[in-house]
Image (cartoon, coloured by chain):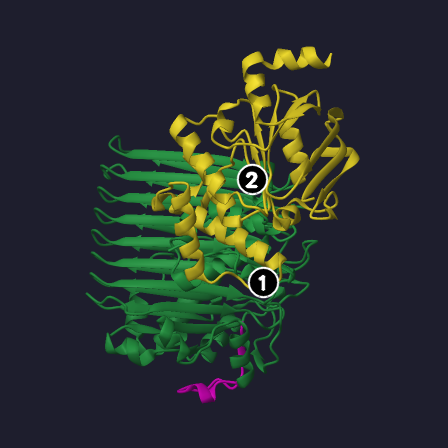
Chain colours: A green, B yellow
Amino acid sequence: MDSNPNENIIEKVTNKEYEFGFVTDIETDFAPKGLNEDIIRLISAKKEEPEWLLEFRLKAYRHWLTIKQPTWAHLNIPPIDYQDIIYYAAPKKRKELQSLDEVDPELLDTFNKLGISLDEQKRLSGVAVDAVMDSTSVKTTFQDTLSKHGIIFMSFSEAVKQYPDLVKKYLGTVVPYTDNFFAALNSAVFSDGSFCYIPKGVRCPLELSTYFRINAANTGQFERTLIVAEEGAYVSYMEGCTAPQRDENQLHAAIVEIIAETDAEVKYSTVQNWYPGDKDGKGGIYNFVTKRGICRGDRSKISWTQVETGSAITWKYPSCILKGDDTTAEFYSVAVTNNYQQADTGTKMIHLGKNSRSTIISKGISAGYSQNSYRGLVRIAPNASNCRNFSQCDSLLLGDKCGAHTWPYIQCNNDTAILEHEATTSKISEDQLFYCNQRGIDTEKAIGLIVNGYAKDVLNKLPMEFAVEAQKLLSITLEGSVG
Amino acid sequence: MLFEIKNLHVSVGGKEILKGFNLSVNEGEIHAIMGPNGTGKSTLAAAITGRDGYEITEGEIWFKGKNIMEMSPADRANEGIFLSFQYPVEIPGVSIQNFMRTAINAKREYQGLPNMPMPEFIKMMKEKQAMVEITAKLQNRYVNVGFSGGEKKKNEIFQMAMLEPQLAILDETDSGLDIDALRIVANGVNQLHRDDNAFIVITHYQRLLDYIVPDFVHVMYDGRIVKSGDKSLALELEEKGYEWIKDTIL
């Protein structure tokens, strides 16, 4: 089906500002500013965590103290004062929430503004939502439907309480706290996130969705998502994010871990729309995220689809370890940068299993004064015979003040591999714009049309309700970028 | 009078290409504009449709009683001026259906109308593509991507049929067409021709005019019309060649 991206955009075209920039007035429970072992103990205590998890956090913290923030990305990152950040903020009044009536009305209003109704409407679209506001998971819908299938989908904190053994078994197995600076930080201070477990042979009947929202000022958000698909299981998972408009920068450092056992399949889709900062580059979210999945069992499959339009700085490489034989991994990405945004994003495909296959489709779109980089690694291990990778990295430039960069790395240690890499760089041509103009389509709409066409291969991979949102977002992000 | 150009002077990159061009077109008429290469035919089409880089230094363009020279290209299109491109442009990832829907709804928005309901749109697509003998499959292909020369031109005429312009300019629509495609394209134009619209057919050769019969034939040379007549002028031109025109005006 071909949906029309422009139909809904028209009314939005006049709205040039970040539309999710509101702040919700909710009583918030803060930890004091700064980071030390006491803060970590406080977070752990607030969440009534078991001893092993506190130990995990403290080990991560002590490791973090020994390492430096990485500098290899093509990003100009202003110094971050890690002692000037609040590491725990939660909406107050959070008791055991059994029904919607118990949720703070202000909070419900916020999620309504964001277009996420937490009520039963979602049943119609078949989406179960876990909403995370600042650091705490607010409400998970459709628990009943899911639990009938033995599916666990709940906030991370809740899972730690109810299924400590499962969490302990998988936590940090794909992204160890030693992985990198931001992973260590997250492992030390993560406050909530989502946990998802699909038992053997179960095909999850709903799209699962987590919505992240930073609300409080001076707060970092450090959520953690852990998805486990047991043998033969299937799940499609979506993640959305927004934040208020603020003059200061806010830090977001998340971890997502995915484990796919034999014959399991996990699809993970993200529409990242954190506040990108204003036209002059003031404010915006610093987005340092570690996402990795492992195709642990034979014939398992993991696919990442991301639409990145927000954040002042994005540092993010959703990756796959193809450990099992005959495994499949995919990475589909659209990254849009405008004004002074910077993005360094891409993927790593680590082929360990025989006959494993990976596909990388990356579409970068740069406008304004932004810098947009693709950074990718394809590695074929010595024993991984008959592997295949196809990579396509395209860059589209709007205007002549922005930058597009591509850093593809290939490490092939097995002669039987077939690796293909294609890359293009293009500009929206005057000819294309005039052709659209001559059909009555004004330049703003024409750019939306052309950009959405350019990104189509990726947008097609998104679940339906996300695709429509993403199409709108692409056009809105680029408003006023060609003048 | 539907359309009128008065003493039009157009420069491209500082070089004057049109040098006092005049043309009057009434509703229901078909005008053919012929002339050798480099005489300003495509510049004329670009200037009428408002393309960037074509600077009007003198003269006026009137359409339906409005001076359109200050209008944006999109507004001129939405007023009812259509250009069938000599070289239709590829737009990867954008299906013809999506493209047409966007165009039609842009026009309706311009006219203060709501979007066209989807069933009506689909029905219209079917009817119009049959007119130019386009298979339904073509509709899901991306605009002009991987099209043959003939398919591109048929697609232009299809778009024209969808948008129902009051003034259609066909810029070298016959170039690169085999005889079958030429006949299909011409049939499409003839079916669309009504009492309340008009066509300007820009062509090198008279063979297109065997199928689209013009009411007037104008011969352009060096940026202006140097000779006008009825369809017999095209035949005479074909027989005697453009050298004959040069000789008659010098």
* Quarter of the view holding residue B81: top right
Residue A433 location, x and y as percent? Answer: 59, 42
Q: Residue at x 50, y 44 (%)?
A: B192
Question: As drawn, which residue projects farthest toward the bottom?
Answer: A101
**Residue A306, placed above or below residue A393:** below
Residue B32 is labelled as none
Element at label 1: loop
Q: Is residue A93 magenta?
A: yes
Q: Residue at x 62, y 50 (%)?
A: B78
Residue B113 is labelled as 1
Residue A328 location, x and y as percent? Answer: 28, 48
Quarter of the C terminus of chain B within the rendering: top right
Residue type (three-letter) at the residue carrying disc 1 = Leu
**Residue A149, placed above or below residue A405:** below
Pointer 2: what residue?
A432
Q: Is residue A418 magenta?
A: no
* Quarter of the view holding residue B137: top left
Q: Which residues are magenta?
A: A88-104
Q: Nearer the viewer, mark 2 or mark 1?
A: 1
Quarter of the N terminus of chain B within the rendering: top right
- Front residue of A103 and A128: A128
Residue A417 location, x and y as percent? Answer: 27, 34
Query: Does label 1 lie on the same chain as label 2?
Result: no
- Front residue of A102 and B113: B113
Q: Chain of mark 2?
A: A
Classify residue A293 as left or right of residue A239: left
Q: Residue at x 76, y 35 (%)?
A: B6
Residue type (three-letter) at the residue carrying disc 2 = Gln
**Residue B178, placed above or below residue A89:** above
Q: Chain of mark 1?
A: B
